[in-house]
Image (spheres, grey):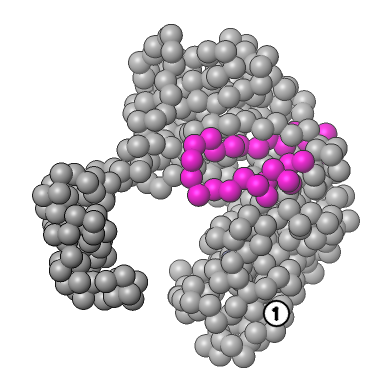
Amino acid sequence: MRRAYNKGHWERARSHAFKIIHRPKEQELARSVMIRSFWNEENFHEVIRLNSLWGNAFQKLSELAVYSLNEQIPGNEKVHHPKILELHESQPMPKGLDLKWNSHDTSMNFLQEGNRLWMVHPHGWTYWDMPNDFLLATTHHDLLRLTAEILLYPWQKSTRTSLEGTRKLGTLPSLAFSAGTDSTAAALVMPEHTILGYHRRNFESILDHRNADRLLAFMTNEKAKTVVDISSNHELIRTYHFKQIGFSSDFACATHLILLADHFDIGAIAFGMPLDNTWLVKGRKFRQFQETPYFQYWKERFLKAGLDLLLPIAGISEAGAMEICQKEKVLPYLNSCLRGDGTNGCGDCWKCFLKNGPLGRPFDINGKEIQIFLKRRPLPTATHALWALQHLQLESKVPELSEYLEQDLSWWTCYYPPAKNILQERWQEETWNNISNYLSPMKQPYPVESVHYFGD
Ligand SMILES: [Zn+2]
């Protein structure tokens, strides 16, 4: 029975199980084999039936079956995955005070209990654990409104309200620090007194903070950076709208810094957004980024709240960011692979190819996921992927991409000089000096400006 089950011969495993299921000693195992084999065959009706027949002994599996059945039927009302429901139910709520969601003035949706800052939203509560001397009462209302907009706008259009515009620009620069390659490169090129704000997801998930913790210690001790480490559960907001756990929008990774702007006198919030997502769309088509409605809107919006929206590595590709990290010997603390052991990559995923491969770390170009992605059109993260293939001299492995690999892509690690113009004057000189100490400029005509792969 076990052998058949482990080999994936579900029917055979069940017929073995059926022969012993009446023996009291074997019953539990036999039932488990039967119900799980139906699960593996995606026979969800049978899973539900057997669970109720056997006194709800397989409650979790049955709940998953109900969820999966519902997902299969198009047009069915969506239900939450049992794990997400469990997370929703286990989140804390304010103990004393209460608030109802206010869609007219979103700054009225916040309250403080001890060092915990709460925000009510249409589906519940979210919170940040702030430094002990943080005070909501002395936090400008525009900072609260900007936070609500960033976290809720995708679903609550009313959060895009007018701002007072009375907060004076603060004096210190800060960076939404994710402990990844791009934001580490941003930290290294930014002014010396930049505050690094780490957002810590504080509920159980597959995310592993160990590498990040070692990097935070390194940046504090070896690079003399001020690190502010704030826990929050706001990545759950999306899940109320049947999206995966994660940030509501691009700038959600900085809401802790926005909320702390008055506390620390912050005047700029930076993001490690690389060239791949600024002057390039999805890493494969050039655009005039500084003219996009996206950049124009958010730059003005942050400024209205007394904050410069700062994109220090907007002119640097992921490959350039990797080179900066390499030069500063930060690489031992960085690994983009989500399937590794927290230190080493798995060697088989797309990230291992893109990010670990060019650093000389082991990966298998024939790995299943890497092959699937290489055959996908448009090629994901195109310019970087093509550069990596060329850099690793793997052109012969992908003859179907030969037309894109004829040109020399070594410019991909150089910085794009026009990107200097989007940096606000007070941060410009120091940041740009640092960048030009690490990398060389692209030569004119800038090759990135003619990037347009795989059509639209
Ligand atoms: Zn990997």
Residue 164, image quadrant: top right
- Under circle 1, the secondary element is loop
**Residue 69 image point, x, y percent:** 19, 54
Q: Quadrant of the N terminus?
A: bottom left
Direction from residue 281 to residue 413 in the image, left or right: right
Residue located 31% across and 70% down the image: 2
Q: From the image, tell me which residue sits under label 1.
A: 392
Direction from residue 152 to residue 23 in the image, left or right: left
Q: Nearer the viewer, residue 443 or 36?
A: 36
Which quarter of the frame holds ligand 1?
A: bottom right
Residue 16, image quadrant: bottom left
Q: For the magenta stretch, what is the residue range?
A: 190-217
Residue located 66% across and 21% down the image: 131
Q: Is residue 410 visible?
A: yes
Compared to residue 375, the image places residue 20 above or below, namely above
Instruction: Determine if the C-beta at disc 1 is less than 8 A from ligand 1.
Output: no
